[in-house]
Amino acid sequence: MKHTPTFLFAALLGGGQVLAQGNSANKATADISQFTSVRPSTQAQGLRIPATHTFQLLVQGGAPYSEAADGVVKESFDFTGYVPAYSGNSAGQGNSAFGQNHNAKGYLSINHEGSSTATSGVSMLSLDFNTATRLWDVTAKNAVDFRSVVGTFNNCSGGVTPWRTVVTCEENTPTAPTDSNRDGYLDFGWNVEIDPATHSVIDQDGDGTPDKLWRMGRIKHENIVVAPDNRTVYEGADDGSSNSFVYKYVSDEAGKLANGALYVLKLNGTVAAATSGVWLRVPNTTPAECSNTTVLARALGATSFNGVEDIEINPLTHQIYFTAKGPGTVYRFTDSGTDGTTISDFAIFAGNTPTNPNVAYAINYGSGVVSELWRTGADNLTFDSKGNLYVLQDGGRNHVWMIRPSHTQAAPAVELFAVTPAGCEPTGMTFSPDEQFMFISMQNPSASNTEATTDAAGQTVVFNRSSALVIGRKEAFGKSNDKNKGAELLLADVYPNPVSGPELSLQVTHSQKEEAMVQVFNRLGTPVLEQSFELTKGVNTLRLPVSELRNEQYYLVIKTATSTTTRSFIKQ
């Protein structure tokens, strides 16, 4: 490869494109789970998903609601639950023909994990899949009104029930607990069930006043998952190293969550060594008992898992899977059933272990294989009907992983679905009933991100606000079919970043031999460095002399005849 470094004063290049990379795993089928991994890297400004896939932006924080009085969509997007508006399989389950009976309509429930009642809440989008354009239309954006239950606080994750309602979970509570409506229950720290069609809180006892789900306990709720029996519910608490317990709730009536028995898990031994455990009954009859779930569970000797983030049910084996963010571990176990009091087969499924806190997995990204650390922060989980498990990371490099059903720790089957935009945490994930579409959010990406890309609908997208997306294979979207058949775009990683030495390295993966121009601009947009390279097909390592640059933030633009992308770095 050749290069000619020169300092210059030239015009700034146009906006960069989001990077898509990897080779098509199977272009003959519209199966979203078929892809070649992206190459692991630090977060850049754009979203990197497989070359076979594309995305459509649905809404960003700050967009106006349909009702002007509701103001604008709040920030801090978290759980992103799709609920079909027609009868059929529940969201995220099964492979029903999408839109055969009538146009695909549904609701997208987006949690706002705010730090006050003013910044917390839920937005409910009405969606319509346009069969003519093969794009998603947002027909309404509504704020859920929680005033009847004294508001909500720190809406984190949640769940979609088989009867097509949404449960939003309050993870944290204000420092000073209150009972402002004097109903005997503290105001915050509960699960709340929502009717997505009316975007309103459900009245659980039929007295004409909406309720929170008191009997499920007041804890630092993360998410819930409802078993196929419509009665058994699993939930977890993200409450540090001492109170992060796993709970089971068995409702008295199928499809009704108002009343039931609450249990907490106690392993028969340490987390590192136990293979079985028991469910212990947690008192939840009176308001005082319901408001003190954590204290009661701890007194029973419940096992803490250091940051339980999500719990899901494997659709093939029916085993229960959950994450512990602190160690970065995915556990699984077999439950003995609705009325059972024991679990078995408890084990680590993926991630770090007590004997190996720095597990790495080999990621095959088509043109090479790299070893990528799993790191900590295993957070949201989502199964598809084939048993593929998506793991969204809050911490580490904020990746979106995918684990195949054949995976074991001895014979790993781990892939990397996405490298997410700079500064953000990937949150929530649910599927359309036919699993052609994935709904996911990017929570609070860096406000300083400037890289622009064009989505499947032709919209210009900059990931500088919380963003809710729908992702699918390119053939599932209408407008993306022709414009995405060109040459593969660049995949670039810059390191070290920040850079203090004389050279900045760029690792660029490209699909063909091509000339590339690299330009560096300061924060004012003034060009300070230009260098040309001849790229070859595959992985190219480029080096830029940066010793004469001042200590500040810079933007680096890589441009070829077929692609443009932007990266930022800091000189110190």
Image: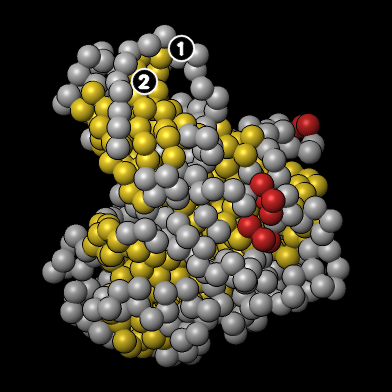
Q: Residues within 10 Å of mark 1 (few under 14, many from 20)?
A: some
Residue 502 x %, y %: 17, 24
Q: Which residue is located at x 37 percent, y 58 percent?
A: 367
Q: Establish if 232 lies above or below 214.
A: below
Q: Is residue 492 above or below residue 22?
A: above
Task: Tell me the residue that label 2 is attached to.
Answer: 530
What residue appears at the point 61 percent right and 60 percent down from the top-left corner?
473
User: Mark 1 or mark 2, which is nearer the start of the sequence?
Assistant: 1
Q: Determine the residue positioned at 35% across, 32% down.
A: 533
Q: Are marks 2 and 1 in contact (CB under 8 Å)?
A: yes
Q: Where 478 sits versus 571, above or below?
A: below
Residue 172 screen position, x and y as percent? 44, 48
Read off the residue under disc 1.
10
**Residue extending farthest top:** 9
Q: Amino acid at mark 2?
A: Glu
Q: Is residue 525 left or right of residue 344?
A: right
Colouring convention used in this rendered image of the protein: secondary structure
Residue at the spot 19% in from the left edge and 74% down from the top edge? 272
Give the position of the C terminus as an image quadrant: top left
Question: Dot 2, how many residues are within 10 Å of its Cα: few (below 14), some (14-19), or many (20+)?
Answer: many
* Residue most extreme to the left: 355
Please count the marks in the image.
Answer: 2
Q: Secondary structure at mark 1?
A: loop
> In the depicted view, which residue is nearer to us: 121 or 451?
451
Residue 278: give its label: none
Amino acid carrying label 1: it is Ala
Q: Residue 294 in the image: x percent, y percent?
A: 37, 62
The reply to whether residue 465 is visible in this rendering is no
Secondary structure under the numbered disc 2 in the rendered image = strand
Which of the pair 304/489 is nearer the observer? Answer: 489
